[in-house]
């Protein structure tokens, strides 16, 4: 929100004054009649009033309704929540004799004379003399003859604008104006002048003045709108009632009360969102019957004994959290965050084994086949010597192989099944599914992430269980800033692994360079010198679409160029999306074993590869990658004890691009980087709130308002703890409000 001081608000550039659109025909005669007394509304009335179409309002016909729709405004409620983005303080009413050049003021006077003429350039000029008993002021309009229709001689009106001294007299150019009479309460009844004037986001077709007119009538008729916020909350936080807040945010009586109103609505929107998340969390968890797993047992013990290393303290803590969840009689819904290589797999295996030792089955879902295969390989190492049957189900299998595995799953011969989402969702019936691990890596990262339901989580619960929902562990390698884990993931419990095995931090000894083309020779020399010291290197080319033929060729051409021209004496291999899984695996295997010096690839290496000997990474066109992705890529090096170098070739064309490159160069910590990303790109981009199923945020910016977010979350979760279905009489309106806010996603909220 900006409060424009009157000394700045009249600049022509921002079009605040004198834009022709601001003077579209208004019904000034209704000015003083704005306070319509509606009968006191009951709860249901209120609901239907808020839900009624904008066309039911005064001044809104079908054309205006169409224009409003462009602003996503369809109902009365939408309009009420269409808040001003700026205000002009035009509340200072002055006598003409006291005016000084350059001031922005409001003058109230009578129209005395009207003159029309053409300037030398052919512009039609309208010149209206205004008299207030102390002197004359002249209002000047260009090419807007119709103004005179509403400002006939003898009309009393308020004029707001910037004062100029021209041709030895006082002028206002294109002033905002408003016809008034003796009944008009200046600053209360006026809409466009003599007050703090709101500027609502407008369109070409629907001016801010027009919106003001419509909204003024609406807020004046809303005086008895009940308040959904429980009274104790309002008192505690000293919030004005909702109806008053609507009036004060749209048509403030003072800057202070406007700020109070904005504070209230900011809290309200975060609070309602958190309330929805609290309800959902409750439904998924406490209110649903889950499996009481046995947290300790023979299998677990043997597994821990056989581990070739000590668990880190983060791993132990997270395992304890998971165990507590799983032993509880409610399903687990937990998000496990930890960068690639932080040891999530072991933790996930513990969760799976807790299920298996009690006679249940476990499922692991990975976003790609490569990742599913890698999980399977890891299981082969970690589950060796344990009496656990596990299987991999991928698209590469023949129909009969698939059929056989599916039968085994159904009969309970397989304890743990690994596969991609699709396979597990579509084909498989379980005998007794108890634990689901969803590995999102970053593929379903924050941006594309929609609610879990769509990602195949609730289909699991509804299809595979009868009353007893499996426990669910979602793993992600993308560091999720706290603000996001409180909103997008706000219905999950969160566990974080920060410390990496061996006590190193991933990018601790990685130095990042952002370079332009001129440094290419230097970069190649760096690669060569590292390889001469026995290290290995990655070269990453951006990939727009994994199936993109041109791109595949680009990688192959680049590989040929590097092999033939730059590194003819070195061993270069490449992988891209077009290779079959087996071929990819073979190349990766060679790189892992050290029989390749350089691995050229598309972003395939992003996930899963662990080659401690690799110490250089060169990324082409780095500005095309997201920050999370670059950070993932960078995590491929510096995994051993060697100092490592990440060289990003970038030519960012935009301010945002430069800011992102600067962030990746400077910030090593994934969480900090994620916060920076949020700030640089703006929440809208990163959030995808719309797709997320969460209500839109109009006033709040979660990074900036994280304190309010935390308070709102606490209040919301407290209320849901006391009254899980919002059944208390004092929560009835609240329930309706939450339902309304989550309208499109009620199913998500209440039924999954
Ligand atoms: P993530 O799944 O989080 O990417 P992994 O579970 O694959 O990470 O672990 C990365 C590597 O670290 C693996 O080789 C794993 O065996 C090893 N590892 C895991 N936990 C520990 C530990 N506590 N101490 C030493 N090495 C570990
Ligand atoms: Mg449980």
Image: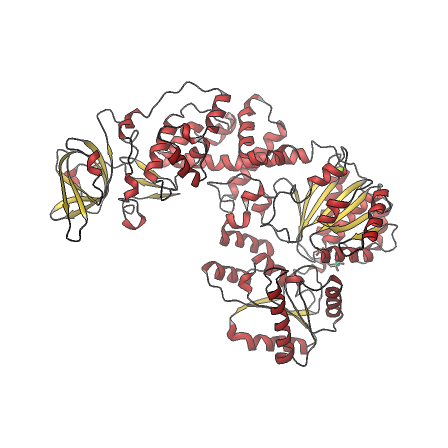
- Ligand 2's quadrant is top right
- Residue found at the very far left of the displayed protein: 168
* Quadrant housing the N terminus: top left
Q: Residue furthest top?
A: 39
Q: How is the image coloured?
A: secondary structure
Who's the residue at 75% across and 58% down the image?
Answer: 374
Query: Is 352 left or right of 574, judged from the image as shown?
Result: right
> On the rendered structure, is 684 left or right of 355?
left
Camera-nearest residue between 246 and 141: 141
Tell me where residue 351 appears, x and y as whole percent. 77, 46
Query: Residue 285's x, y, as percent?
Result: 69, 35
Q: Is residue 535 above or below residue 450?
A: below
Is any atom of residue 317 visible in this view? no
Q: Foreground: 167 or 644? A: 167
The relative height of residue 422 versus residue 272 in the rendered view (above or below) is below
Q: Is residue 564 visible?
A: yes
Residue 90 appears at what percent x and percent y? 28, 38
Q: Based on the displayed image, in which of its 4 quarters is residue 501 positioned?
A: bottom right
User: Quadrant of the image for the C terminus?
Assistant: top right
Among the 4 quarters of the image, the one containing residue 725: top right
Residue 343, picture quadrant: bottom right
- Compared with residue 279, is residue 626 higher up or lower down, i.e. above or below? below
- The answer to whether 159 is drawn above or below residue 353 in the figure is above
Q: How many numbered marks does the figure carry? A: 0
The x and y percentages for residue 340 are: 68, 57
Which residue occupies the foreground of this view, 109 or 316? 109
């Amino acid at each position: 929100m900006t409060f424009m001081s009157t000394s700045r608000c009249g600049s022509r550039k921002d079009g605040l004054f004198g834009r022709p659109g601001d003077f579209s025909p208004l019904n000034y005669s209704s000015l003083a009649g704005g306070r319509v007394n509606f009968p006191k509304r009951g709860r249901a009335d209120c609901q239907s009033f808020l839900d009624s179409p904008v066309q039911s309002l005064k001044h809104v016909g079908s054309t205006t309704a169409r224009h409003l729709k462009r602003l996503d405004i369809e109902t009365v409620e939408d309009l009420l929540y269409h808040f001003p983005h700026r205000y002009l303080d035009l509340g200072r009413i002055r006598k003409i004799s006291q005016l000084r050049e350059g001031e922005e003021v409001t003058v109230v006077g009578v129209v005395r004379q009207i003159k029309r003429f053409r300037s030398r350039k052919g512009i039609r000029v309208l010149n209206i003399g205004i008299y207030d008993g102390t002197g004359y002021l002249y209002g000047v309009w260009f090419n807007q003859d119709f103004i005179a229709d509403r400002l006939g001689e003898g009309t009393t009106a308020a004029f707001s604008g910037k004062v100029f001294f021209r041709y030895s007299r006082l002028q206002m150019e294109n002033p905002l104006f408003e016809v008034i009479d003796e009944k008009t309460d200046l600053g209360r009844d006026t809409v466009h002048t003599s007050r703090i004037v709101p500027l609502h986001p407008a369109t070409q077709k629907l001016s801010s003045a027009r919106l003001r007119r419509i909204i003024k009538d609406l807020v004046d008729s809303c005086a008895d709108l009940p308040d959904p916020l429980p009274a104790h909350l309002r008192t505690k936080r000293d919030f004005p009632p909702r109806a008053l807040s609507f009036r004060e945010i749209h048509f403030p009586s003072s800057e202070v009360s406007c700020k109070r109103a904005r504070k209230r609505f900011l809290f309200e929107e975060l609070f309602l969102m958190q309330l929805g998340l609290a309800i959902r969390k409750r439904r998924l968890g406490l209110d649903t019957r889950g499996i009481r797993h046995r947290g300790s047992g023979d299998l677990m013990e043997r597994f821990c004994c056989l581990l070739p290393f000590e668990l880190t303290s983060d791993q132990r803590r997270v395992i304890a959290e998971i165990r507590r969840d799983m032993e509880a009689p409610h399903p687990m819904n937990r998000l496990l965050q930890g960068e690639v290589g932080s040891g999530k797999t072991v933790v996930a295996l513990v969760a799976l084994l807790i299920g298996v030792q009690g006679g249940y089955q476990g499922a692991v879902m990975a976003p790609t086949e490569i990742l599913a295969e890698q999980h399977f390989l890891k299981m082969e190492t970690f589950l060796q010597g344990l009496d656990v049957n596990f299987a991999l189900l991928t698209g590469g299998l023949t129909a009969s192989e698939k059929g056989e595995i599916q039968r085994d799953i159904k009969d309970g011969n397989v304890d743990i099944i690994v596969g991609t989402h699709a396979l597990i969702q579509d084909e498989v019936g379980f005998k007794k599914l108890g634990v689901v691990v969803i590995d999102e890596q970053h593929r379903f990262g924050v941006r594309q992430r929609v609610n879990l339901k769509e990602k195949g989580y609730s289909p699991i619960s509804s299809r595979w269980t009868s009353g007893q929902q499996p426990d669910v562990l979602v793993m992600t390698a993308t560091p999720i800033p706290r603000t996001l884990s409180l909103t997008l993931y706000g219905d999950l419990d969160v566990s974080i692994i920060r410390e990496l095995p061996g006590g190193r931090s991933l990018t601790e000894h990685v130095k990042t360079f952002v370079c332009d083309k001129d440094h290419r020779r230097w970069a190649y020399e760096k690669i060569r010198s590292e390889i001469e010291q026995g290290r290995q290197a990655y070269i990453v080319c951006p990939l727009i679409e994994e199936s993109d033929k041109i791109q595949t060729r680009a990688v192959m051409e680049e590989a040929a160029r590097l092999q033939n021209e730059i590194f003819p004496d070195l061993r270069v291999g490449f992988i891209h999306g077009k290779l079959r899984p087996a071929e990819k695996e073979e190349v990766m295997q060679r790189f892992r074993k050290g029989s390749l010096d350089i691995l050229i690839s598309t972003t395939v290496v992003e996930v899963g590869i662990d080659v401690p000997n690799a110490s250089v990474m060169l990324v082409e066109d780095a500005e095309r990658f997201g920050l999370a992705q670059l950070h993932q890529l960078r995590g491929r090096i510096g995994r051993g004890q060697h100092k490592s170098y990440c060289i990003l070739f970038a030519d960012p064309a935009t301010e945002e691009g430069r800011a992102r490159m600067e962030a990746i160069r400077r910030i090593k910590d994934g969480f900090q980087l994620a916060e920076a990303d949020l700030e640089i790109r703006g929440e809208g981009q990163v959030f995808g709130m719309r797709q997320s199923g969460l209500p839109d945020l109009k006033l709040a910016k979660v990074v900036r308002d994280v304190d309010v977010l935390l308070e709102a979350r606490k209040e919301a979760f407290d209320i849901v703890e006391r009254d899980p279905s919002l059944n208390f009489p004092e929560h009835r309106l609240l329930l309706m409000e939450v339902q309304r806010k989550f309208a499109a996603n009620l199913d998500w909220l209440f039924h999954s």
